[in-house]
Amino acid sequence: MRSGNSKAFSGLILVSAAAIAVTGCAVGTGQSETADIDFSSDAELSGTLSVMGFSGVDEVATSRMELAEDALGEVTVDLIEGDLDLQQFLSAVATGSPPDIVYADRDQIGSLAARGAVLPLEDCIEGERIDTGQFVQAAIDQVTLDDEVYGIPEFNTVQLTMANADLLSAAGVTIEDVNGSDWEAMSAANQALTKSDGGRLNVIGVDSKLPEFLPLWAKANGVDLISEDGRTAQLDAPEVVEALEWAVSIYDDQGGFSAVKAYRDSADFFGEGNQFATGVLGAMPMEQWYVNVLNDVSPDAPMAFDTVRDRNGETLAYASGSAWAIPAGSENPEAACRWARVMTSIDAWQAAAEARIEVREGEGKPFTGILTGNAQADEMISGMVTSGGEPWDTAVAKMYEANDATFSMPANPADAEFEQALQDAVNAVLNGQAEPAEALASAQETAQSALDEAWADLESRD
């Protein structure tokens, strides 16, 4: 299991919206009561625990699973193969045959909770004595709808500024010029770094990573895309329009988004021929798990790292990740709660870090840390990191700095529809079909309508 959620923003939206549109009406059966469930930490458990969505199992997963299975006693754990299929999951809930626990992206929790597909976890948290104060606040915010917690966070994903140091030097710019703290300097650096031959792009100067990172650039410009209470869309705020205009201009200065996207998609992203190792990308913001990929496949690449910074020069990162949630109709919610507690506990994360260190040492490679979603576990693991020399030690330090400066979009009952409206707007601009202000105004109307309707529906069932 990677230390974070690497799924693209755009892909998540399409899957989420399609699945909920297909099965949303059937799922909205209301939240199941939890008062009669014995969530106490000393309750004896039995039966089977079916787990959906927990794929890509590696030593970080298996080391924690062993502890969780020990804590479950006589319970038999059944892992359902593959990533979470939302349509399959929602259909299972609607027909009364859901898995016992589900591993979902945190930005899906709000819609799932609003449709009664997952249980509120207050009794689970109290019974199993889960200290929610240990978790990264941005992660808890993503799984809290209308003051109710519906998920136990696991892993955290943040962004770093990653750059080819040789290209920076040759262009006469520095990592500070491409970390987002000065948009004019970043635009100038982009132009200095970009290389074309006969109109064909040879070196991408800067990739501003649209559409997925617009929330990051908007926050860097001083505004959130949605209000803190999850009720009011702010997509047409002047700061968002300015952020989109600037991020798109980064592509325009290189021949347009389609040219940049086609060139970046041709790279051997996960291999030794990646864009940094081959010198065809100057800089981009990217999730921290890519540091480990680069160190694995191209340890001698001339890298430079920093956090992403807002326009005041302060570090910020857009938090994402996964969470454990208990479906409505779970036949073994007691075991599900204990599984979630143990899998995200400090003891489990220590075991995971030790297992990963053993593997890395066997390969002669450094341990670059794990971002867990549990702030206390993160602090512990940061002290277990092994040195890989520069620039990798700087990358790890910047990762933990970013993890202390996260924000997220709050859970809301229309999160899939909200994100779909946002993606449609950004893509319309990238494809030359609309100007930023026009596209965001339309998205604002669509997103706010979805929010108003979803909140009204949720409150009518209270």
Image (cartoon, helix red, strand yellow):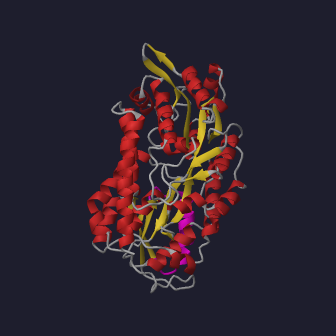
Residue situated in front as seen by the camera: 89 or 192: 192
Residue at x 71% of width, y 49% of height: 386
Asked if 386 appears above or below 92 in the picture, the reply is above
Q: Main secondary structure of the magenta part?
A: helix
Relative side of 376 to 219, left or right: right
Query: Where is residue 312 shown, x and y percent of the image?
Result: 66, 39
Q: Quadrant of the C terminus?
A: bottom left
Is residue 53 something one can see in this rendering? Answer: no
| Residue range of the region highlighted in magenta in the rendering | 55-75
Q: How many marks?
A: 0
Residue at x 34% of width, y 61% of height: 453
Query: Where is residue 377 shown, x and y percent of the image?
Result: 65, 62
Residue at x 53% of width, y 34% of height: 272
Relative side of 405 to 343, left or right: right
Is residue 188 something one can see in this rendering? Answer: yes
Query: Where is residue 37 shown, x and y percent of the image?
Result: 46, 84
Relative side of 8 to 137, left or right: left
Residue situated in front as seen by the camera: 341 or 33: 33
When asked about the image quadrant of residue 86, the answer is: bottom left
Residue pushed farthest top?
198
As for residue 68 lying within the magenta part, the answer is: yes
As for residue 57 lying within the magenta part, the answer is: yes
Query: Where is residue 41 shown, x and y percent of the image?
Result: 57, 81
Asked if 288 appears above or below 451 in the picture, the reply is above
When asked about the image quadrant of residue 168, the answer is: top right
